[in-house]
Amino acid sequence: MIWSLIVGAVIGAIAGAITNRGESMGWISNIIAGLVGSAIGQWLLGHWGPSLAGMALIPSIIGAVILVLVVSYLFGIRSRG
C-alpha cells in the first residue's frame, strides 16, 4: 500500500514536470494524479513496459500527463513558464 503511494507520487511528479504544472501541485495532488493517471493509462494503453508496485510505468506516466492536462484545462490553471 505505501509502496503504491510512493510510486504514485513519483509518477504524478513526473507528469507535473512534463506539463510544467509541477509547481502548482502539492504532494497529495501528485499522489492522486499518479494513481488515477496510472489507472487511466493502463486502461487506454494496456499493461506493458517496466512495472513498479503493480503499475506499468510508461502507460502510467502517459495517463497522468493526460489527467494533469485535462484537469489544468478544466480549472484554468496556467503554467508559470
Image (cartoon, helix red, strand yellow):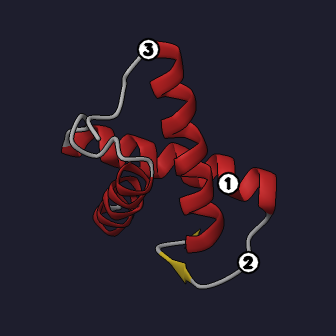
The residue at the far top in this view is 75
The residue at the far front in this view is 81
Q: Which residue is mark 1?
A: 41
Q: Earlier in the sequence, mark 1 or mark 2?
A: 1
Is there CB contact under 8 Å for labels 1 and 2? Answer: no
User: At 37% across and 49% down in the image, what residue appears?
Assistant: 16
The location of residue 78, given as percent across then percent down, is 36, 26
Q: Is residue 31 above or below residue 50?
A: above
User: At 66% across and 46% down in the image, what residue appears?
Assistant: 40
Q: Which residue is mark 2?
A: 48
Work out how far the residue at label 1 is from the one at label 3, CA to CA, in angstroms.
Answer: 21 Å
Work out how far the residue at label 1 is from the one at label 2, CA to CA, in angstroms.
Answer: 10 Å
Quadrant in which the N terminus appears? bottom left
User: At 53% across and 49% down in the image, what residue appears?
Assistant: 64
Is there CB contact under 8 Å for labels 1 and 3? Answer: no
Q: Is residue 37 above or below residue 53?
A: above
Between marks 3 and 2 in the image, the one whose residue lies nearer the viewer: 3
**Residue closer to the observer: 30 or 75:** 75
Between marks 1 and 3 in the image, the one whose residue lies nearer the viewer: 3
Q: Earlier in the sequence, mark 1 or mark 3?
A: 1
Work out how far the residue at label 3 is from the one at label 2, CA to CA, in angstroms.
Answer: 31 Å
**10 Å crowding of disc 2: few (<14), some (14-19), many (20+):** few
The location of residue 63, given as percent across then percent down, is 61, 51
Q: Earlier in the sequence, mark 3 or mark 2?
A: 2
Side (left or right) of 39 relative to 72: right
User: At 53% across and 35% down in the image, what residue appears?
Assistant: 69
Q: Which residue is mark 3?
A: 75
What is the three-letter code of the residue carrying label 1? Gly
Side (left or right) of 10 relative to 52: left
Is there CB contact under 8 Å for labels 3 and 2? Answer: no
